[in-house]
Image: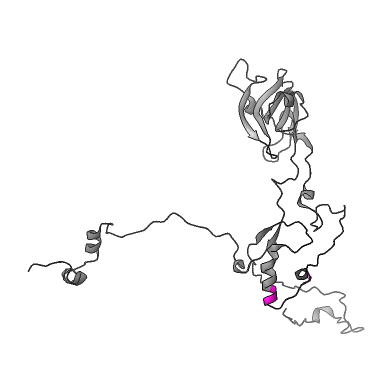
Amino acid sequence: MNIIKRKIALDKYVSRNDTNVNTLTATTFNINVFFSQDIDDMGIGTEVPFIEKNINTPAEYNDLITKLNSNGYKFEFMNGTTTNIPYSNEYPSARNPNKQISQYYINGIPVSGLTEDRLDDVSSYDNANKYKPGFDIAKSINDDYLGLQYNNGTRVITNNNLNPITYLIDGDTDQSAIDDLPNIKRGVYYTTTTAQTRTILNSVLGNYQIPYTTMQYNSEGFNETNVHLSATTKEEYLFGITSSPTVFNDLFIDRGRATVIQSHMQLGEIKNMSDLVNYGNGFYKIQR
């Protein structure tokens, strides 16, 4: 920290009247203070996998303990001492050594809202019957985040002349799942009513009307596929390195004017008659 001293002229802040000459009249002073700082980027960190609490010192700490001992440092965890932190419902997501990794997972909940229609995704090429209930526009066999296999499809469920039309995008098309709609387990379930509209406020395009469309889906919550719990560790050799190394595996070797043929490479090194005579200590037999 640097201490900077400044002198302030009080000429504008004292009275010039005869009754109270040189009396300070200002009650406050405004001083511009310029702050600056130099920060050295510590660089990228290394993620260490989450280790659940155990009464024994983890084997992964052995190298760390050896290094700390060699430098004369002593910490309580090196003797097997652990910290007992009480769990509080006020901060359920806070990191706590008494919690197992599965305790950070949260089950998904149904989500619903208003959106734009996706009728183009379920329209067929049949002009007479463009929206065919039960006809899969796209289908495949997928695995959900739990690894469970299901029939994935995009189709119209019901169509009352578009008032309303219900359809499923990337959802479970098994008959049991279809019968359970609108309680949806996989994919997004839409209901569009073209006779009813909703006003979209837009400062650029102006206000415009769209068909009234609702959507419903079941969120996956927090699980092992979208939550990563790890400690961020700074390794010495990465201090100051702010991005991951980039490997360029496409190499181009410029051989100049000579080709890879041996004789051509030799001739490429000869520039005059003297080079030809002296090349390779008499490699070429010169007839005079």
Q: Which residue is drawn at 68% across and 69% down?
A: 64
Q: Which residue is drawn at 69% across and 28% down?
A: 168
Residue at the extreme front: 56
Q: Which residue is drawn at 59% across and 68% down?
A: 237
Give the quadrant of residue 223: top right
Name the spot of residue 39 as percent of width and height, x first.
Answer: 66, 70
Q: Which residue is drawn at 73% across and 27% down?
A: 177
Is residue 72 covered in magenta?
yes
**In the depicted structure, whether residue 278 falls above or below residue 185:** below
Residue at the extreme top: 128
Is residue 264 visible to the viewer in this orientation of the structure?
Answer: yes
Magenta-colored span:
68-76
Give the quadrant of residue 8: bottom right
Q: Identify which residue, 195 or 218, lies in the foreground.
A: 218
**In the depicted structure, whether residue 144 falls above or below residue 196:** below
- Determine whether, in the image, residue 135 is placed left or right of residue 52: left
Question: Quadrant of the image for the N terminus?
Answer: bottom right
Q: Identify which residue, 236 or 120, lies in the foreground.
A: 236
Name the spot of residue 271 as percent of width and height, x first.
Answer: 21, 67
Is residue 21 covered in magenta?
no
Name the spot of residue 55 as percent of width and height, x first.
Answer: 79, 61
